[in-house]
Image (spheres, rainbow, N blue to C red):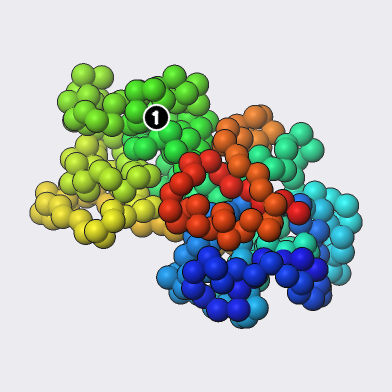
Amino acid sequence: MKAAYIKETGSPKNIIIGDLPEPEIDDDEVLVKVTAVSVNHVDTFVRAGSYKTDLSFPFVIGRDAVGQVVKVGEQAAARFGVGSWVWTNSMGYDGRQGTTSRYIAVPAERLFHIPESVDPIKLVASVHSSTTAAILLKTVFRAKSGQTILVEGAAGHVGTKLVQIAHRMGLEVVTTSNKRDFDKLDQLGSDCPLDYQKSLIKQLAKRGLDGVDYVVDTSGKVALQENINVLNERGTVGLITAPADNKFTFNVRKFYTTDKTIRGFVLSHALIDQFTESAKLLNELMVDGFLLDDAIIKKPVDDAAWAHQALEKQTVKERIVLTF
């Protein structure tokens, strides 16, 4: 079968497009004929070896995929049938082979149905960012209706997903972005769009907001102390990225005496229950037309190395989807 794989970690030049044996499935697995995969920054980290995880070579790259079920293990038959359209977003690490091959063997617990009305290409482009946002809001923050969240860099992939999900959960959503994105964010659910180039505290004060309950900086470009300053008592900063210099400074005494919290989160450490809960929410929202707003560059699987290079060099802003 056709696959994009590596024999050792390293540069994008290590990616091979070639033939590998079709995988066999265990009783609790499903064999999926892959239609498309999305390419994420974390895929480049795994390929390069900078994200340390259990790999067996030849290693098929990629985490997310959409496709059709072609074979079902005995234990998986209760949930899946041949011909069903499905998606997965947690392959390609912790000893699991990736998704950029014509056929993949997926544990049933890591596989979810695609709603009939949802475009599989738009879905696969969305699920990495959307799952990050959903798990962060639902199980890391445990956010509740009526609370306030500040999403910085809200016009990006994860930012737009945080805005939409938080809005649907009943949170008051404050966003920072370029002014040209204000209309878009208003349509997605922002209650208070702010200019990222101006003072946060001054802009919040003008809007009558003393602070927020949660802050997520999707860009890694805002000083940690600035985000702590706008938090309400017992508020939480969620870290899903870090600045290039990997350094933060903040007033520790003022931080702990106001019961504030910093929580780090990466999707690679999410639990099965978190993936399952978020998948149900994502499917519900996508049926209603949410979370499918990404601009997409669609390329054949043969361009896998190009896709990794484009992400590493930051030459594309669109979501990259590779198709078979």
At horizontal 81% and vertical 72% (from top left) the residue drawn is 22
Q: Nearer the viewer, residue 107 or 79?
A: 107
How packed mark 1 is, by other alpha carbons closer than 10 Å (few <14, some 14-19, many 20 or more), is many
Q: Position of residue 136 (x, y in %)?
A: 45, 49
Task: Return the x and y of residue 111 as percentages of the image width and height.
Answer: 71, 57
Q: Residue at x 65, y 36 (%)?
A: 286
The image quadrant of residue 226 is: top left
Q: Residue at x 41, y 57 (%)?
A: 265
Q: Seen in the image, is 261 located left or right of residue 90? A: left
Which quarter of the image is occupied by the N terminus? Answer: bottom right
Label 1: which residue?
Answer: 173
Q: Left or right: where does residue 104 sit relative to residue 184? A: right
Q: Position of residue 292 (x, y in %)?
A: 61, 35
Can see residue 232? Answer: yes
Q: Nearer the viewer, residue 110 or 44?
A: 44
Q: Amino acid at mark 1?
A: Val
Q: Is residue 237 above or below residue 187?
A: below
Quadrant of the snapshot with the C terminus: bottom right
